[in-house]
Image (spheres, rainbow, N blue to C red):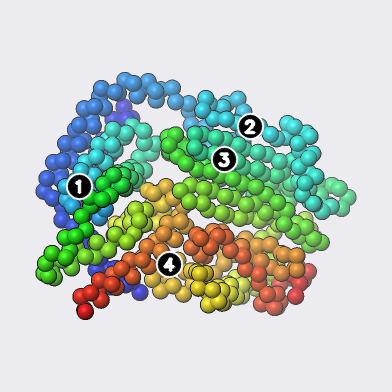
Amino acid sequence: MRQELLQKKVEEKILDSYEDLYRLAYSYVRNADDAMDIVQESVYKAMKNAGRMKEEGYIATWLWRITVNTAIDFIRKNRREVATETFYETGKEDTYADVDTIEALEVLDDRERAVVVLRFFEDRKIQEVAEILNENVNTVKSILYRSLKKLKVELAKGDALYEG
Amino acid sequence: MRDKRLEHMREDYTQIEIPKELRGKVEGAMARAKKEQNVTAYERSGRDGERRPKRKAAVWITRAAGAVVAAMLVVTVLANTNADVAYAMEKIPVLGAFVKVVTFRSYERKDNNMEADIKAPEIRVENSEGEVLEETTEDLNRKIQEYTDELIAMYEADVEAAGGEGHESVELDYSVVTDNDKLFSIRFNQLIIMASGSESIRIYHVDKATGKVITLEGLFRDGADYVKAISENIKEQMKARMAEDENKIYWVDNVDMPELNFQQIKEDATFYVNETGRLVIVFDEYEVAPGYMGYQEFEIPTEVVEDIVKEGYLEA
């Protein structure tokens, strides 16, 4: 009985947040098909394991965690196939400027990327990010600090390119 | 101030387009999971039914030995029951006449790749006639116990949450760092290793003159702004260390993430008095600097606080 209820809650949460989960997945693979696969797999895992949840309040954290892990697994398996070359193809600025900035996430490792996306893009609290990644709060702070520094350097390079 | 380019990036992120077919795929995945769920539901409910009831989070193994030994965990009991061991421990730290480590408790547990090894002493505070000062003894032991209970509860919660898949190691050890005419201080080193490690330090002090447990505040005159005096000095030291060595980073004057910047010490900041009689403030790993810097100590020149410190605790 309790299990069914939990599953119902998980279902609601998924329908509520699958678009956010998709964006996170997309930031790892940067193509729609793979990102959808990741979301599908994460949703499947979440529903299958809903009964193992201890607390209702933990559902969101847990959904994010599954999606981050699934995305990281995916990217590790397919490391070489993730395309990065599209950006040189044409000179049209308005469409490409967008892709560039997200692409800058490439300079981050898997964990750093998760921290930046969750904290900075998804506006999760540091404490929540720490729970999602099963990390110490202070570790997350220090990863965030390091990542934003790296990103700024990378983004500055992009600017120099446009100006030159 | 936030970097404009980072803001731009965040803007781009929110505009990642959601494919129309995503919703259908999500619903499909949920339906598939539910269908399979029904097939295995019997198995699972059977297993759940057997699950042992959730224990009170922080029971010392010594108190509830029989109740908590589940199949998968190895427990070692090494405590009060064994007089020789307690006696041996009493000998190890060099203790003054007034404060003694009379026994210790140990909590050890191993669950697959997770383990905890937590050692905590029981302290007895006596006056010069050898009478036990109950209030302080209880106060100190309670503080130590709360601290260790918290640590054990955290570990046990992590074990539960990880469902056998976690990697974690929790260690707690202690030593007597100060035992002079004025102060007896016992220091706990806590090391938690998850994906990365984290070191944390707590120190408890007994004021020998009053026989009471004291915190940093107790070293200073009533109403004195020791927090500000010490904090300002630490900021200067941080900047000096950074200027001297470019590999050193402290979170001070950082414009990108001002919320991380060290503002001031806590009123009950961790401290000890070193051999030269100077106050040393201790920060846990990550507290004021990135993780690679480890935990941090700052010796405060006595002149910084000489107008506000009570007599006898510090030396110039």
- Which chain is indicated by disc 3? B
Give the image location of residue A38, x and y in percent. 24, 44
Which one is closest to the eye, mark 2 or mark 4?
A: 2
Give the image location of residue B59, x and y in percent. 59, 35
Do marks 2 and 3 share a chain?
Answer: yes
Which one is closest to the eye, mark 1 or mark 4?
A: 1
Q: Which residue is mark 2?
A: B76
- Which chain is indicated by disc 1? A
Q: Is residue B125 visible?
A: no
Q: Amino acid at mark 2?
A: Thr
Do marks 2 and 4 share a chain?
Answer: yes
The CA span between labels 2 and 4 is 44 Å
Q: Amino acid at mark 4?
A: Glu
Q: Which residue is mark 4?
A: B259
- Residue at 75 percent of width and 32 percent of height: B82
Considering the numbered disc 2 on the image, is that residue within a helix, a strand or a loop?
A: loop
- Residue at 33 percent of width and 32 percent of height: A51
Considering the numbered disc 4 on the image, is that residue within a helix, a strand or a loop?
A: helix
Do marks 4 and 3 share a chain?
Answer: yes
Is B110 drawn above or below residue A82 in the view shown? Answer: above
Q: Which residue is mark 3?
A: B116
Q: Amino acid at mark 1?
A: Asp
